[in-house]
Structures are given as structure tokens and as C-alpha cells.
Amino acid sequence: MARIFAHVSSNNSEFSHVYIQEIFKVLAVNNFMVIKRYERPLLQLVEINDQYQRERITKILNNLYEVFRKNTMYWKQCDQLIEMTLKLAKRCRMFAVEISKSKNLLTMIATITRENPSFPYNQGRVKIFRDGVINWQHINKEKKLVNQGKVDSISNYSK
């Protein structure tokens, strides 16, 4: 389906903009698991090499910034958005060039990763999931499975 919509978007600025808007409407209101589903359609869009490629990428970057801005309180949502942004930049050179010009988005990504370099166990300012706060005391009541030290060791091991 992503290829079909990308084909229709080729040399079609109007359809591209509507399609991008619809994708980001979905991303703005759903949880982090939905973001992965839209990586391929967005990748197909940014890879279309036509006269509107830069325009499409700019539209995607602007929408990405807006979704980021509205979800800065949710760590997992931001984590998935950052992952998707990096994948798009890695796979499409033009996207990487244009993201370097998007200072607001880059600043936001840098701030989020600096404030929360790993899983935020204590959930002070940032919630992990949009769905609610994890009650660690209840989870750890009997078996002391998770604490900040364990989370940090896992995140350091995975680097």
C-alpha cells in the first residue's frame, strides 16, 4: 500500500500534502506502537525523486516537530519518533540534508535525549506512556524486579 500511495504522490503535490496530513493526524492521537506502522509510508514518500521531494520532506519535518512538541511529556512516544526520524535520515540523503536545516526539531530531539538518556524510572516530569503512570511500588512489592540501578545497567549494556 505504501508504494501505491507513493506512486500516486509522485509529481502530485496536492495529494502528497493531504496524505502527509492524514498520517500525522493519526500519529498525533495514537500511542507509540502506531508510529512504527507509518515508517514505511513516510520512507516511500521522502524517497520519491521528483520536483516536490524537498517540499514533501519539509512538510514531514514540520509535522514531526508538531507531534514532538505535543508529546514531550511521554518518553516512549518521543523515543519512537526519534527512532523513526533517524531511520528516515539514514535511508534518505535528502531527508538528512533537510533535517540539518530544521533547528527547532534538532533542538527538541537533543533536549529530550539529554534530559532522559535512558528509561525514566522515577517518572518525575516525564511519563513513560501516554496511557498512564506505572505503579512501580505495586509491581515491586513482592519481587523487587525493577529499580533505577537495574534500568541504568540495562541501558548502558545496550549502548
Image (cartoon, grey):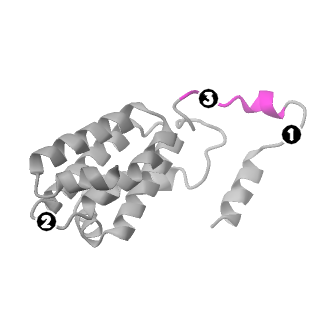
What segment carries the magenta color? Answer: 131-140
Q: Quick one: label 2, few (<14), some, or many (20+) residues within 10 Å?
A: few
- Residue 120 lies, in percent from the top left, at 61, 44
Look at label 1 and name its amino acid.
Lys
Query: Where is residue 126 shown, x and y percent of the image?
Result: 53, 37
Give the Cα distance between marks 1 and 3: 18 Å
The answer to whether residue 109 shows anywhere in this view is no
Residue 8 in the image: x percent, y percent?
19, 51
Please indicate, yes or no, whether residue 78 appears anywhere in the rendered image: yes
| C-alpha span from label 1 to label 2 | 56 Å
Residue under label 3, please give it: 133
Looking at the image, tell me whether mark 1 or mark 3 is earlier in sequence order: 3
Q: Is residue 25 left or right of residue 130?
A: left
Label ID, residue 50? 2
| Disc 3: CA contacts within 10 A as few (<14), some (14-19) or many (>=20) | few
Q: Tag 2 or tag 1, which sits nearer the N-term?
A: 2
**Residue 146 located left or right of residue 91:** right
The image quadrant of residue 123 is top right
Q: Quadrant of the C terminus?
A: bottom right
Residue 134 image point, x, y percent: 66, 31
Residue furthest to the bottom: 93
Residue hosting label 1: 144
User: Which residue is painted at 34% across and 49% down in the image?
Assistant: 1
Kindly identify the amino acid type of the residue bearing the numbered disc 2.
Answer: Asp
Frontmost residue, 10 versus 142: 10
Q: Nearer the viewer, residue 38 or 8?
A: 8
Name the residue at 71% across, 28% down: 135
- Mark 1 nearby-residue class (10 Å; few <14, some 14–19, many ≥20): few
Apparent side of residue 155 relative to residue 1 in the rendered image (left or right): right
Q: Secondary structure at mark 3?
A: loop
Is 134 inside the magenta-drawn segment?
Answer: yes
